[in-house]
């Protein structure tokens, strides 16, 4: 059986794998990326947040991605009946990017891998990793390409960027249940033939149907719009008695006073996709010779679009630490990787939980608006969840709950 030797093997060519590969290529590391699927492919995670722009820049991908004309995302809108709360990323606490993109992931991920291949990165598409054996930090992985041919790859380090494939968590038995309640989603792309002119037509919006049920609307520059319904799994299952995804999406659109006239009866670009009980977790983020990134570690919930941000944050950090380790440095993976990533995940988990309790919604829709509070929440929604100068990061466990309590008390008095 043929064997290939590399410094670092990257599993998966999505956003996490792409930024890891882009960074390591610039450092001169010998890398190989194996990707089970063929690109382009449809996948969820189409709303980015500003923090990811730092990662694309560090990975040398920003300029190429910007040339594609993806829809710019300067903020986000949350609709609840007649109430609207709009966050503008240029009005946030602290430094950081004040815009990002809304992207059809099929096009976006292909754009990243095209640029990486143009730069000489070795990406093997339609290639599955079947097994990995670790000997200290060295490993031998068995892969199978699309023709059925098997071969091995010897690597000094493995970065798992396989997302929902969760390759190493499955092979090494690291999977754990999420701390979040069971939620599911159904989404598709709609040919947005009745798109209004101006900001109303292009603005990403979350339309709250019930406290735990909401519709996402993500317009793209290609004229299509991603529309998805999210809610407790039982609720999503009841949208169609026959579990028919098309019927479920149609029924979801009927529930939205704001969007029913815009989207009802329009053609779908592909059959709607259902994601059931999507939140996941793992027992550890790293081990001798490997690191898990992105959805290979934890996926929380799509409500604040944190998925791709955690993917790229962990992907580029794992790449930096692995490169340092291979250069002979001592790396404290527990502190520099696991503890760091876990902190950001905990901050976002608090906001997801407080969204579903209704406490965060109290803050969003309270009038008159408190600009200082809004700027600090906006920084969290922009992905700057490691900036402990922001009290809405440093005190995340209690601050939303306490402020919501005070608002409720004052409204009763």
Image (cartoon, rainbow, N blue to C red):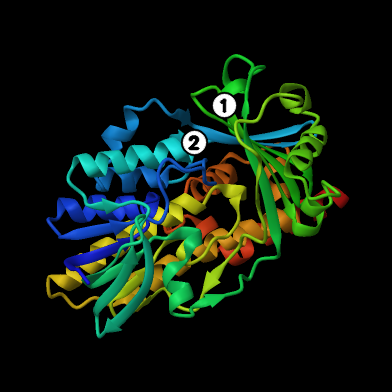
- Please determine whether, in this image, residue 180 is positioned above or below residue 109: below
- Quadrant, the N terminus: bottom left
**Numbered disc 2: secondary structure:** loop
Image height check: is 318 above or below 224? below
Are the residues at dot 1 and dot 2 in contact (C-beta closer than 8 Å)? Answer: yes
Res 257 visible = yes
Residue 355, by quadrant, is bottom right
Q: Residue at x 42, y 56 (%)?
A: 311
When the figure is inspected, residue 230 is found, relative to residue 175, above or below; the finding is above
Residue furthest to the top: 197
| Dot placed on the residue nearer the N-terminal end, 1 or 2 | 2
On the image, numbered disc 2 is attached to which residue? 104
Camera sees residue 403: no
Q: Under tag 1, what secondary structure?
A: strand
Q: Which mark is residue 224?
A: 1
Measured from the top left, where is residue 49 in percent x and y? Answer: 47, 43
Image check: 256 left or right of 401?
A: right
Q: Position of residue 198 (x, y in %)?
A: 57, 16
Q: Which residue is pictured at 51% across the width and 41% down the height?
A: 46
What x and y, as percent, mark residue 202? Answer: 56, 24
């Amino acid at each position: 059986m043929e064997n290939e030797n590399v410094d670092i093997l990257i599993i998966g060519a999505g956003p996490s794998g792409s930024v890891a590969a882009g960074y390591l290529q610039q450092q001169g590391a010998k890398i190989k990326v194996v990707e089970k699927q063929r690109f382009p492919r449809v996948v969820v995670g189409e709303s980015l947040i500003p923090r990811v722009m730092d990662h694309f820049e560090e990975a040398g991908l920003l300029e190429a991605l910007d040339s594609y004309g993806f829809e710019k995302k300067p903020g986000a809108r949350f609709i609840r009946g007649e109430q609207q709360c709009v966050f503008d990323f240029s009005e946030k606490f602290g430094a950081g990017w004040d815009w990002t993109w809304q992207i059809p992931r099929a096009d976006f991920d292909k754009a990243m891998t095209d640029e990486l291949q143009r730069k000489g990165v070795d990406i093997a598409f339609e290639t599955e990793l079947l097994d990995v054996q670790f000997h200290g930090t060295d490993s031998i992985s068995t892969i199978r390409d699309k023709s059925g041919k098997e071969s091995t790859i010897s690597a000094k380090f493995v970065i798992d960027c396989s997302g929902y494939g969760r390759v190493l968590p499955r092979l090494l038995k690291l999977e754990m249940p999420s701390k979040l309640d069971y939620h599911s989603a159904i989404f598709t792309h709609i040919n947005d033939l009745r798109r209004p002119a101006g900001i109303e037509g292009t603005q990403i919006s979350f339309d709250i149907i019930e406290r735990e049920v909401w519709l996402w609307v993500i317009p793209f520059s290609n004229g299509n719009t991603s529309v998805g319904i999210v809610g407790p799994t039982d609720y999503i299952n009841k949208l169609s008695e026959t579990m028919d995804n098309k019927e479920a999406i149609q029924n979801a659109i009927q529930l939205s006073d704001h969007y029913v006239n815009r989207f009802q009866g329009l053609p779908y670009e592909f059959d709607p996709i259902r994601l059931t009980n999507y939140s996941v977790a793992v027992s550890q983020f790293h081990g001798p010779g490997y690191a898990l990134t992105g959805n290979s570690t934890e996926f929380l919930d799509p409500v604040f679009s944190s998925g791709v941000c955690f993917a790229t944050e962990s992907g580029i950090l794992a790449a930096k630490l692995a490169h340092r380790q291979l250069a002979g440095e001592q790396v404290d993976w527990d502190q520099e990787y696991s503890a760091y990533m876990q902190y950001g995940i905990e901050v976002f988990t608090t906001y997801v939980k407080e969204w579903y309790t209704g406490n965060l919604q109290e803050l969003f829709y309270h009038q008159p608006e408190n600009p200082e509070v809004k700027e600090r929440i906006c920084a969290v929604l922009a992905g700057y969840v490691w900036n402990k100068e922001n009290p809405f990061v440093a005190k995340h466990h209690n601050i939303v709950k306490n402020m919501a309590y005070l608002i409720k008390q004052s409204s009763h008095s």
